[in-house]
Image (cartoon, coloured by chain):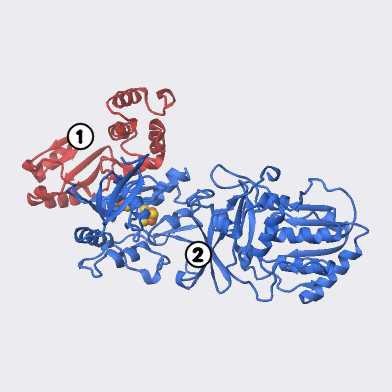
Chain colours: A red, B blue
C-alpha cells in the first residue's frame, strides 16, 4: 500500500513508514500506528477510520476493529477534548480511588465512560497504570498525576480547556 | 525422521507412523484416538484458544495443546492419563462457568460438542456458586444465522472461516476477557453466500440456522448421505429428514468436491420437496388415474404420434438411471428430437457452479442434446416432457406446437397424461457432477407411499411399447446395466462410486 493514496496526513504516513522499519512485519506496527491515527482522528476510531487504517496496513478491517475493541486505550465512540483515566486497581482503591470517583461523578456529572456536557473531557475508570507507589493516580491524556486528593484533582481538571 | 517424510511416534502406547508436519490431533486420529478439540479445524488456521486438546508430551514439562504441537520422531504422547484428564476437567469447568446451560431450549442439543465433552471430560458438577455472566441472546445476523452470545465459547472458528475461506471477513471480537463478544461488520448482518457453514463449524449452540431452528430434535431425524442438486458442483451433503419431510442439508466432507463446505443456496434448495401442492397420483385427460391406466394412455398417445414425430425434452435434474430409462422409451418409439433443459446462472471460484442443475453431463451421456436457444417452428404429434423443478421451462409456444402431451412434473401441469415426479431425496441413483464425477444420490424419505420413481414408470412404459423389454428391479442394477453398456462408465460399480464418487472414464464428450 503506497502512502500516497492514504487518507491520512503525509506526516502521519511518514511516521508509520518509520515504524514499519522497526518490525519484521507491517502488522506488528499496528498498535503504535493506531495511537498516532487515533490522535489525528479526534481521539476515536469511527468505522471510516477503521477502514482507512486497514487499507493503510493491507489488513482486513475486522482485524483492526478487533484491536480497537480489545484495548482500552483505543476508543470506538467519540470522546471529549481530553481523556481522564482514573486508576481503580488495588493500590489506588486502598488509597481512596473510590472517593475520587464519587467526587468526579458528583462535581462534573460524568460516570465511567461519559463525556462532560461541554465536551471538555471523557472520564474513564482504568486498570492499573503502574504507579502504585504514588496511589491514587490518574492519567490525563498522556500526562500522569500522582498522589491525588480531591483538591489536586480539581486543580488539574479545572485547568483543562 | 523415518523414511520419506514420515515420523514414528507413540500415542497412548500405540505406535504410529504418520506424515511429518501434521499435528498431534491429526496423528492421534490416524490411530483411532480422538483428542477433543473446539477451536481446531483441519482447514482453518491454528489459534489454540480453547485449550481442551491438552496432551502430555513426555520430556516436556507443561502439557501441550495437541492442535499446535507438530509430531516429531520418537515423540511419546499421552492423551488420556490422569494428569491430562485432570487438566481437561479444569478446562471444561472454565468453559462452562458462564455457559447458560440452556440445553433444553437450545437447537444444538444432541450434536453439541460442549455436551459431548462435558460428559466425556467434565466433572459432572459445578463448583461455581456465583451469578453467571449475562450476554445478549437471539441476535439476528441476517435472515440465515442466529447468534447467542452466552453460548459462544469464543473459539473463533466462525471468524476464521469468513476470513480465510469465504474471504468476506465479517466477524470480529469486541472487548476482552469475560466481556468478549462477537460483532459483525456494519449493520450486523452477514453477507457471505457461504455464511451458513459457520453454523456447522460452531461447536456449540451459539450459531443456529434460522431455517432449521426448532423444527426437530436431531435425535428424531434420519440422516442420509447424498448430494446437493442446486447446481452442477454436486456438493456432498447429509440430508436430514423426519416423518418423510426434508428438514435440512449439511455438507459432508469430500476432499475432491466440496471439502467441508457448501453454499447457502444449495443448503436451502429443498423447499419444493415438502411442497404441499405436489401431485401424488397421475392424471389422464385431467382425471386422476392409477399408474397402469395413465401409462396405457401415454402409450396410446405416443404411439399415435409416431408418424407426426415426437419431441422428447428431459430435465437435467434426472438421475442417470432415469435418463437411460427415458432413452430406452425414446429408442422404442424412434424419437429423433431428444433435448434437455439446463438452467444457467452465476458461478464463483469457490463452489457455486453456473450450471444450476446437477446432471447436464448425464443428459449428454444418455444422448440428449442441449436445448437450442431458438426452437424451430416444427410441429410435433406429441411431447414427452420431464419438467425441470424450477428456474427453467420449455417455452409455451414449443409446448403448443405439440398436439398431445405427456408431462412428468412435481406440481400439476395441463397435459393429456400428467405423471408425478419424485425429488432426489426420494430415490437412489447417480448423477455426473462438474469435473465429470459420478456421484450417488440416496433415498432418505418417501413423500407419499403411492408414488413411483420416474425410472420405474419409464421402464413400465418401455415394456408397454416393447413387451420384450424388462427393466432393472433396482437403481443399483440399473446402474450396473448402464455401466456395462456405456464405455464412459466402464468398470464403475455402485460400490466403487460409493460415498465419495468416482471419475468418468471418457469425459471429453460431456463438458
Ligand atoms: S459463535 Fe461458535 S464458532 Fe463462533 S466463536 Fe463462538 S463458539 Fe466459536
Ligand atoms: S483445539 Fe487446541 S486449543 Fe483449541
Q: Assign a secondary structure to mark 1.
A: loop
Residue hosting label 1:
A142
Residue B90's place in the image compared with B195, above or below, is below
| Number of the label disc, if any, that sits on residue A54 | none
Characterize the local packing of mark 2: few (<14), some (14-19) or many (20 or more) Cα atoms within 10 angstroms. some
Disc 1 crowd rating (10 Å Cα; few below 14, some 14-19, many 20+) is: few
> Which of the image's four quarters has the N terminus of chain B?
top left
Mark 2 lies on residue:
B212
Q: In this rendering, is residue B226 above or below A53?
A: below
Taking depth in this image into account, of B378 and A152 the one nearest to the observer is: B378
Could you say where residue A102 lies in the image, as x and y percent from the top left? Answer: 16, 52
The chain containing the residue under callout 2 comes to B
User: In the rendered picture of this protein, how many numbered marks are placed on residues?
Assistant: 2
Whether marks 1 and 2 lie on the same chain: no
Position of B274 relative to B349 (above/below): below
Give the distance between the C-alpha atoms of the residues marked 1 and 2, in whole angstroms.
53 Å
| Quarter of image, res A137 | top left
Which residue is located at x 83 percent, y 48 percent? B375
B235 with respect to A46 (left or right): right
Q: Quadrant of ligand 1?
A: bottom left
Camera-nearest label, 1 or 2: 2
Report the residue at 84% width, 67% height from top: B465
Q: Position of residue A142 (x, y in %)?
A: 20, 34
Of B381 and A27, the residue lying toward us? B381
Q: The C terminus of chain B appears in which quarter of the rendering?
A: top right
> Which chain's residue wears label 1?
A
Determine whether B245 is above or below A30 in the image: below
Amino acid at each position: 500500500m503506497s502512502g500516497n493514496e492514504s487518507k491520512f496526513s503525509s506526516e502521519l504516513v511518514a511516521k508509520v513508514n518509520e515504524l514499519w522499519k522497526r518490525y519484521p512485519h507491517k502488522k506488528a506496527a499496528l498498535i503504535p500506528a493506531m495511537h498516532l491515527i487515533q490522535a489525528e482522528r479526534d481521539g476515536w476510531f469511527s468505522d471510516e477510520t477503521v477502514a482507512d487504517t486497514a487499507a493503510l496496513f493491507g489488513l482486513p478491517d475486522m482485524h483492526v476493529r478487533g484491536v480497537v475493541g480489545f484495548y482500552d486505550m483505543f476508543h470506538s465512540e467519540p470522546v471529549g477534548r481530553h481523556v481522564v483515566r482514573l486508576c481503580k486497581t488495588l493500590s489506588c482503591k486502598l488509597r481512596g480511588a473510590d472517593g475520587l470517583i464519587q467526587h468526579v461523578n458528583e462535581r462534573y456529572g460524568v460516570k465511567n465512560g461519559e463525556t462532560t456536557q461541554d465536551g471538555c473531557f471523557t472520564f474513564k475508570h482504568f486498570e492499573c497504570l503502574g504507579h502504585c507507589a504514588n496511589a491514587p493516580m490518574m492519567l490525563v491524556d498522556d500526562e500522569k498525576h500522582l498522589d491525588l486528593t480531591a483538591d489536586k484533582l480539581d486543580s488539574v481538571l479545572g485547568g483543562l480547556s | 525422521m523415518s523414511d520419506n517424510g514420515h515420523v514414528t511416534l507413540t500415542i497412548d502406547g500405540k505406535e504410529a507412523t504418520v506424515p511429518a508436519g501434521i499435528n498431534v490431533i491429526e496423528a492421534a486420529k490416524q490411530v483411532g484416538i480422538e483428542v477433543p478439540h473446539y477451536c481446531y479445524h483441519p482447514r482453518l488456521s491454528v489459534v489454540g484458544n480453547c485449550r481442551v486438546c491438552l496432551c502430555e508430551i513426555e520430556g516436556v514439562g507443561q502439557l501441550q495443546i495437541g492442535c499446535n504441537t507438530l509430531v516429531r520422531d520418537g515423540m511419546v504422547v499421552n492423551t488420556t492419563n490422569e494428569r491430562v484428564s485432570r487438566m481437561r476437567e479444569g478446562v471444561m469447568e472454565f468453559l462452562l462457568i458462564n455457559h447458560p446451560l440452556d440445553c433444553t431450549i437450545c437447537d444444538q442439543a444432541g450434536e453439541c460438542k460442549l455436551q459431548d465433552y462435558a460428559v466425556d471430560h467434565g466433572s459432572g458438577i459445578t463448583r461455581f456458586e456465583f451469578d453467571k455472566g449475562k450476554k445478549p441472546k437471539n441476535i439476528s445476523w441476517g435472515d440465515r444465522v442466529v447468534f447467542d452470545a452466552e453460548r459462544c465459547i469464543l473459539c473463533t472458528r466462525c471468524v476464521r472461516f469468513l476470513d480465510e475461506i469465504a474471504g468476506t471477513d465479517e466477524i470480529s471480537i469486541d472487548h476482552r476477557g469475560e466481556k468478549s463478544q462477537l460483532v459483525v461488520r456494519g449493520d450486523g448482518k452477514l453477507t457471505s453466500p457461504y455464511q451458513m457453514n459457520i453454523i456447522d463449524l460452531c461447536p456449540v449452540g451459539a450459531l443456529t440456522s434460522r431455517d432449521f431452528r426448532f423444527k426437530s430434535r436431531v435425535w428424531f431425524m434420519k440422516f442420509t448421505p447424498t448430494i446437493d442438486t442446486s447446481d452442477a458442483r454436486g456438493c456432498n451433503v447429509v440430508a436430514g429428514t423426519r416423518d418423510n419431510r426434508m428438514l435440512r442439508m449439511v455438507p459432508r466432507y469430500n476432499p475432491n468436491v466440496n471439502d467441508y463446505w457448501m453454499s447457502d443456496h444449495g443448503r436451502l434448495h429443498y423447499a419444493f420437496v415438502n411442497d404441499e401442492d405436489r401431485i401424488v397420483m397421475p392424471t389422464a385427460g385431467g382425471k386422476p388415474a392409477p399408474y397402469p391406466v395413465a401409462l396405457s394412455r401415454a402409450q396410446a398417445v405416443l404411439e399415435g404420434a409416431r408418424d407426426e414425430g415426437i419431441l422428447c425434452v428431459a430435465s437435467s435434474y434426472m438421475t442417470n438411471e432415469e435418463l437411460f430409462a427415458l432413452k430406452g422409451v425414446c429408442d422404442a418409439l424412434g424419437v429423433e428430437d431428444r433435448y434437455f433443459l439446463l438452467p444457467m446462472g452465476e458461478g464463483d471460484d469457490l463452489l457455486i457452479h453456473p450450471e444450476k442443475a446437477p446432471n447436464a453431463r448425464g443428459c449428454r451421456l444418455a444422448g440428449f442434446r442441449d436445448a437450442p436457444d431458438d426452437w424451430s417452428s416444427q410441429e410435433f404429434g406429441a411431447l414427452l416432457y420431464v419438467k425441470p423443478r424450477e428456474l427453467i421451462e420449455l417455452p409455451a409456444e414449443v409446448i403448443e406446437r405439440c398436439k398431445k402431451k405427456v408431462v412428468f412434473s412435481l406440481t400439476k401441469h395441463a397435459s393429456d397424461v400428467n405423471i408425478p415426479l419424485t425429488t432426489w431425496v426420494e430415490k437412489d441413483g447417480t448423477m455426473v457432477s462438474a469435473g465429470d464425477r459420478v456421484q450417488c444420490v440416496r433415498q432418505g424419505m418417501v413423500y407419499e407411499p403411492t408414488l413411483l420413481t420416474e425410472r420405474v414408470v419409464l421402464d413400465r412404459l418401455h415394456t408397454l411399447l416393447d413387451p420384450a423389454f424388462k427393466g432393472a428391479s433396482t437403481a443399483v442394477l440399473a446402474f450396473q446395466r448402464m455401466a456395462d453398456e456405456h464405455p464412459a462408465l466402464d468398470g464403475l460399480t455402485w460400490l466403487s462410486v460409493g460415498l465419495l464418487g468416482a471419475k468418468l472414464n471418457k469425459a471429453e464428450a460431456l463438458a
